[in-house]
Amino acid sequence: MRKLYIVMFCLFLANGFNSAFAQEADSQKAKFRKTIEEARKALGAEPARGDLMVVIANNYAWQEKTDSALIYLEKAKQINYYNDDLFDSWLNVLLWSHRYESLLETCRVAEQYKYSHTENLLRKKMVAYTELRDYDEGIELFKAPGNKEFLKLDDISYMYNNLIMKRNTNVVQAFYSIDCFDHNAPQHLANLGYAFKVGKHSLALRANYADRYHMNDVLLESDFYLQMNNKSYMYFNYGYAFDASLFPRHRAGYEYYMPLEYKMEASLGARYMKYISSEVFIATGHLEKYMGNHWVAFRPFYVMQDNGNSFTLLANYRFYGKNPLNYWGVELTYGNSPDDSRATMENAAFNNLDAYKIKLERNFMLNSISDVRIGIGYTREEYITSKFRNRYLIEVGYRFRLR
């Protein structure tokens, strides 16, 4: 019954989020329509008002009607209404409509007409070069002495580092964690991985090592992310353990991720684990939402196995700085996550027992090609039915990007 309440609570939150965002969106659209109507009336009386054309274009653009916005911007250009207001609107519309080639050409026109917002122009160029995957050209922008001073700004520094990271697509990853208990020996988990691009897709290879209960085991694992044309993508996973004493002998996973409105994303997927004498099937998915510098996500797991089914729920929150690689995070977990290699030993003994976990995370950049993540956590977990113990966690992750 308690698990049912948790599921119902999560569904209630998701429904509340959707209703609130829909009401806010309807109210904003009504304001945009009213502004357009009033500006059109004024433009009818004074047809040479370029400022009104820009106002109408902006209100169309905020409704994502970029074709209509460009019609009014073209009218403003025809009467030679070249000034900062026009270029502010023109650059934004091209950016929001993902017309990156046109965006770069408009940047050149803006420079020709002495557009004064150099910082905004630099941002737009960096976004365009990033999206067109012309990373070297974006990096070259900062060889100009006048542009170097903008690297002091957090968001421009991030975009510059992001250009370097996207150019340097080969990533070496290392991770280590230690779990300590009240009266038991510490447990160790580590992995070393290498990720790289395969066309527009991504492949990661990883070796996992566990040392627990006076045993050790190695799991070789691969992750493949298949990018789709509609901004959705698919995730495939397969792993094989040599001894299968701490890891499952075979581990496989699939998940389909799809973008939603209002900066949300959802997914549906499954996991399969084959132990020496048992099998585990898992249904999972996730729902996430960005709200400015805040990110919230929920991931449920429903585990099906011979010795009983179980439910796990993960909730994550992150607060990002101006650089998205710098963030604070909190993770709350009810149950034992099947994706957490700490939670399983032979035959997945812990998966159907209760656990309550909180973890604090801090991720930060060391330089333009590397970042570090540190986490500390506490778990109150059931190790035998109705018997609980304390678990303390410290983990460190490191990523280094090669060209």
Image (cartoon, rainbow, N blue to C red):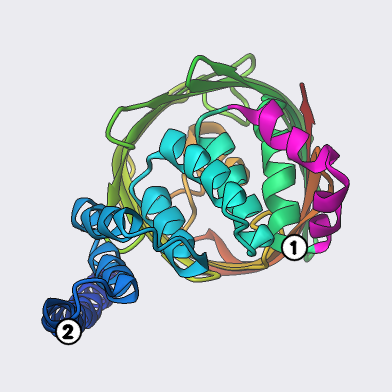
Check the image and report above or below for 113 versus 280.
Answer: below
Residue 331 horizontal/vertical position (percent): 56, 65
Q: What stretch is highlighted in magenta?
A: 134-152
Left or right, 2 with respect to 246, comes to left
Looking at numbered disc 2 in the image, what kind of residue is underneath it?
A: Ala
Q: Which mark is residue 154?
A: 1
Residue depicted at 23% across the width and 65% down the height = 60
Which of disc 1 and disc 2 is earlier in sequence?
Answer: 2
Q: Residue 179 carries which label?
A: none
Judging from the image, what secondary structure is the residue with disc 2 in?
A: helix
Between 127 and 143, the residue placed more toward the observer is 143
- Location of the N terminus by quadrant is bottom left
- Location of the C terminus by quadrant is top right
Residue depicted at 51% across the width and 49% down the height = 350
Looking at numbered disc 1 in the image, what kind of residue is underneath it?
A: Asp
Q: Mark 2 points at which residue?
A: 42
The reply to whether the magenta stretch includes residue 137 is: yes
Residue depicted at 21% across the width and 54% down the height = 71
Residue depicted at 30% across the width and 74% down the height = 55
Residue 324 horizontal/vertical position (percent): 64, 57
Disc 1 crowd rating (10 Å Cα; few below 14, some 14-19, many 20+) is few
